[in-house]
Amino acid sequence: MTFHTTLKIATAILLTTSLAFAQRGEGQRAGDLRTTGKLRVGDPAPDFKLKTKDGSREVQLSSFKGKGPVVLVFGSYT
Amino acid sequence: MYIKEAHPSDGWVVPQNERQGIAIKDPRNYDERMKVAEKICTLLKIKIPCLVDKMDDAINKAYAAWPDRIYVVGTDGKIAVMGGQGPRGFAPSVADTRAWLEKLAASDSAPKRSP
């Protein structure tokens, strides 16, 4: 294998690896599901209607419009 | 809002959780997700409504919320505070949220409480 062939293969591997990282985000490892998102301050908040943890009722974000601010705290157990 | 697990025992395990004996499998259906949400909201004694994202993670994705994040939606329905993404961005956004709410409370535009 010539030096140039080796260099081409190494470059191809490097580009493929870089592309994989770029798709996940720089420095992200497998399992890291962070995404950049498109929301910005001033954008309309995406509406949702979701059940409470016991399933007893549903809460719709837009039902609070005009009544007061809403703090959304996202998270999980782990 | 309970969203997809960050470090389930059958996924991306982190040493901090292992040290604390935290082992939660990633819920495979909505019933399981509701049960885990119930467990953590009870453990943390959360008083505000504890909502559960659906299995398609639609709201999580819409807000780019994983693994944890804070937003404040203003009375006008628009994003007023957009916290940084967790884990590192979470703590600073708690202070930002508090500051925003205190500023609102001190202003004339604060929503009036019912007597």
Image (cartoon, rainbow, N blue to C red):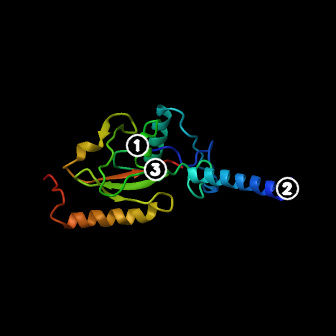
Q: Is residue A7 visible?
A: yes
Q: Position of residue B41 (x, y in %)?
A: 43, 46
Secondary element under disc 2, as helix, strand or loop, is: loop
**Label 2 crowding class (10 Å Cα cut-off): few <14, some 14-19, many 20+?**
few
Q: Amino acid at mark 1?
A: Ile
C-alpha gap between disc 3 and disc 1: 12 Å
Chain of the residue under label 1: B
Q: Residue at the right extreme?
A: A1
Disc on the earlier residue, 3 or 2: 2
Q: Position of residue B64 (x, y in %)?
A: 44, 50
Which residue is located at x 72 percent, y 52 percent?
A13
Mark 1, residue position: B59
Secondary element under disc 3, as helix, strand or loop, is: loop
Which residue is located at x 54 percent, y 48 percent?
A33
Q: Position of residue B98 (x, y in %)?
A: 33, 64
The label number, if any, that marks residue A2 in the structure image: 2
C-alpha gap between disc 3 and disc 2: 53 Å
Q: Amino acid at mark 3?
A: Gly
Task: From this view, report whether residue A71 is shown above or below residue B30.
Answer: below
Q: Amino acid at mark 2?
A: Thr
Chain of the residue under label 2: A
Which residue is located at x 20 percent, y 67 percent?
B106
The label number, if any, that marks residue A75 in the structure image: 3
Q: Nearer the viewer, mark 2 or mark 1?
A: 2
Q: Nearer the viewer, residue B79 or B98?
A: B79
C-alpha gap between disc 2 and disc 1: 53 Å
State if disc 2 and disc 3 touch (CB < 8 Å): no
